[in-house]
Image (tube, rainbow, N blue to C red):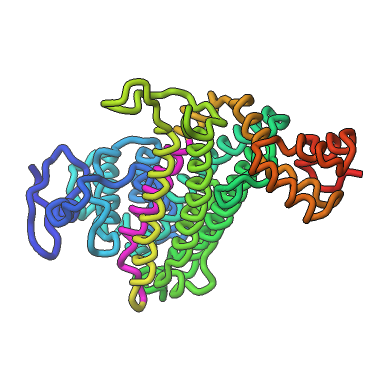
Amino acid sequence: MRTEHDFIGELQVPDDVYYGVQTMRAIDNFKITGQTIDPDFVQAFAKVKKAAALANMATGRLPKEIGEPLVQAADEIIEGKWLDQFPVDPIQGGAGTSVNMNVNEVLCNRALEIIGKPKGSYDIISPNNHANMAQSTNDSFPTSIKVCLSHKAKKLTASLDRLATELEKKAEEYKDILKMGRTHLQDAVPITLGQEMGSYASSIRRGIARIDHAIDGIHVMNMGGTAVGTGLNAEPEYIKKVAETLSEVTGEKYVTADNIIDATNNTDGFSDVSSAMKTTALVLIKMANDFRMMASGPRCGFNELKLPKRQPGSSIMPGKVNPVIAEVLDQACYQVIANDIAVSLGVENGQFELNVMEPVISFNMFNSMKYMANAVDTFVDKLLIDLEPNKEQCQEWLDKSVGVVTAMLPHIGYENSAMIAKEAYNTGKPVRQVILEKGLISQEKMEKILSPKQMTTPGIAG
């Protein structure tokens, strides 16, 4: 054990860990989720700390003999080392101070080890004086959230892109499969299964664009604002330089906010990202539910799609198979929507010069990105790739439908069309048969009007 102290007092810290006294206090104070800091967030924080150290060395304020081992320690974390040294619960009081100090302590103790000094020798390399130089939790924490969200968003949008691409493949594959369209859960007019798949793909592409746009908006940071955004203890040269170094470290363009005070006390950019995910979740739910309904039955439902059989569906009903993959996509998206509510509450409760609710904001946003990406990947791998259409059933419902009479409106008028529909309903005869029996139009022209291509593309048959 080693003894460390802060202004509250002394604590014993295991000598084999890199974190220190303030992390120990956080472990004791915050036992909320049973989880620890997201590794992606730890690595994002290390990038921010590396950028700050580089900027402070560039201004001459941080000596290289201290800054360089701090940068080396940050690089090790970025590479994936020491991730077990961040045991703090992600939901915590203090606006993220516990996370910030956990990172500062690990960086300093590893840097001390690099230069051959004992852990806890904070008179040589200090978590507060050096790792936190020209910073506050209030600028480093939200900036690290942004770096992490940008990283996680790449995986999420890649998963969504893969989903859209697979849907586009199905759109081409199913382009000649005519089926009944439905509005109000009632028979409408024909559509191709390919057109339906293409519409889902289009909505997913729109979701990707929505998320990308929101992520672009959070590349504006408040580093150098320190405690309340006024820049106390941060040199103007540092504020300019840290935006450059963070851009270099991350490979993405980060800029300093025009109004750093605003960027410190307002977190509406996070709400934009969360809202973009929520809206995309709504689109995914709608699509998953359409798949569930089109696959319903199979004997007593629509049975237009054959979903891959992934597991037995009942502990009591032999042979039953449920659409579990579509169901799990629904439920993951419900959680994204619930998380957005928590994010919204966090965003609105930032009083005066700081939003102290950023821990719960970040926790829910990180989870939303993870849940949605995993659920989308599951949907593609376990359902969409092996999806099969039931062409025969699609044709059967089409043959039984009265909705196709809508295509006759420009040729025989609404009244005649309504009369044909009513007789088809009452007698059970196919619409085509009733049309021919009434002699309202020639068979040749009827077949042209009711052809699959004519009924599923704009225009009126001549």
Q: In this view, does 151 lie above or below 353?
A: above
Residue ID at (53%, 49%): 283
Q: Nearer the viewer, residue 444 or 379?
A: 444
Which stretch did the figure color magenta?
353-376
Instruction: Give the percent coordinates (x, y) of residue 94.
Output: 24, 64
Q: Judge by depth and name the residue closer to the eye, 123 or 346.
A: 346
Q: In this view, does 91 lie to the left or right of 248?
A: left
In the picture, measured across the screen, residue 212 lies left or right of residue 417, that is left
Residue positioned most to the top: 319
Q: Magenta: predominant secondary structure element?
A: helix
Image-based side of 369 in relation to 21, left or right = right
Q: Quadrant of residue 271?
A: bottom left
Q: Is residue 67 one of those drawn in magenta?
A: no
Which quarter shows the N terminus? top left
Residue in the picture at 53% in, 34% down:
302
What number of labels is visible? 0
**Is residue 85 visible to us here?**
yes
Closest to the observer: 373 or 445? 445
Rendered location of residue 20, percent (x, y): 18, 50
Confirm whether residue 250 shows in the render.
Answer: no
The location of residue 208, given as percent across then percent down, is: 57, 48
| Figure quadrant of the C terminus | top right
User: In front: 4, or 359?
Assistant: 359
